[in-house]
Image: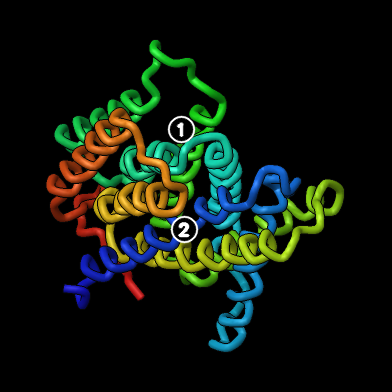
Amino acid sequence: MFNTPRGKAALFMILGALFLSIVPVFVKLIPLNSGIPTTQKLFMRGAVATIVLAVVLLTRGISFRPGNPILLGARSLFGIAGMLTFFIAVEGMHLAEAVTINKLSPFFVLILSWFFLGEKLKKVQVFAVFLGFAGVAVILRPGSIPLTLPAGLAVLSALFAGSAYTTLRALRKTDRPLLVVFWFSAATALFFLPFVIFTGVMPDLTSLIFLFCIGLSGTAGQLFMTKAYRCAPGGEVAIYGYLSVVFSMSWQVLIFDSVPDTAVFIGAGLILLGGWINYMSRGTTVNRDGGILIQECE
């Protein structure tokens, strides 16, 4: 199964979902009274990844020169915005709710891949997108409870993440996955470095370990997800990313001893159903010229 590009995409996305689901766990494990700002957590997320990936690139003799600097810059900006909004959302919401809402990102990938990359969008996929947004509406319950800033940021983080993942489809022919993640991580570290200098605090040992774990798990997850989007069309591989919802619900119960309420389960079910419908509706992906979309997978 995993010998084909589609099979490799599935495996990479599952592993990416697992590691990325661990990131918000460590974000929440750092107590609010520690004084560590969100920007410092994001700096560590980028700094650890930059160091690890720099060593890997040097060991493999891979050039640091990007193939498409403009597109890499766009991917980095979208990724930074997505992480910032997501981290703030995680700090102000239950873990399962924030992660489930963030799973709108594959639906944004579907829409953006159609609009910018020419990947066909079927009517049934439009219905799948509707189910995804309906699921988020159930979780947020507009009209019955006030929409909070973290909830709005969670939705916004999904849009930014979807935009970032869409650029990965365009980058597959110019830049290696390792290089893409390296420059994204370096941009993240550099962007948040001034905030750490002026507003950062010295963490205790436990918080320092959690900060490093944010960076390590984020690095692994981002790398696997980057490789997944190189192996198959954006709308197709996204289905496996929904497993992070299941992982996050498990972490919320096992680690934080909190069971998500009924609305979260119903909303998550609608999002997962939408993702499954989208996945089942995918055939061979074609571009605007009608030719087969060449899939390059390392």
In terms of depth relative to the viewer, which is nearer, 141 or 287?
141
How many numbered marks have been drawn onto this rendered protein structure? 2
Tag 1: residue type? Val
Residue at 16% across / 32% down in the picture?
123
Q: How is the image coloured?
A: rainbow
Up-down relation of residue 46 to residue 85 (above or below)? below
Residue 282: image location, x then y, percent: 16, 49
Residue 290, which numbered label?
none
Name the element at disc 1: helix
Residue 81: image location, x then y, percent: 59, 43
Q: Tell which residue pokes out farthest to the front in this image.
A: 257
Q: Please name the residue that numbered disc 1 is placed on.
A: 155
Residue at 59% across / 63% down in the picture?
215
Residue 171: image location, x then y, percent: 45, 60
Q: Please name the residue that numbered disc 2 is placed on.
A: 22
Name the element at disc 2: helix
| Quadrant where the image shows the N terminus | bottom left
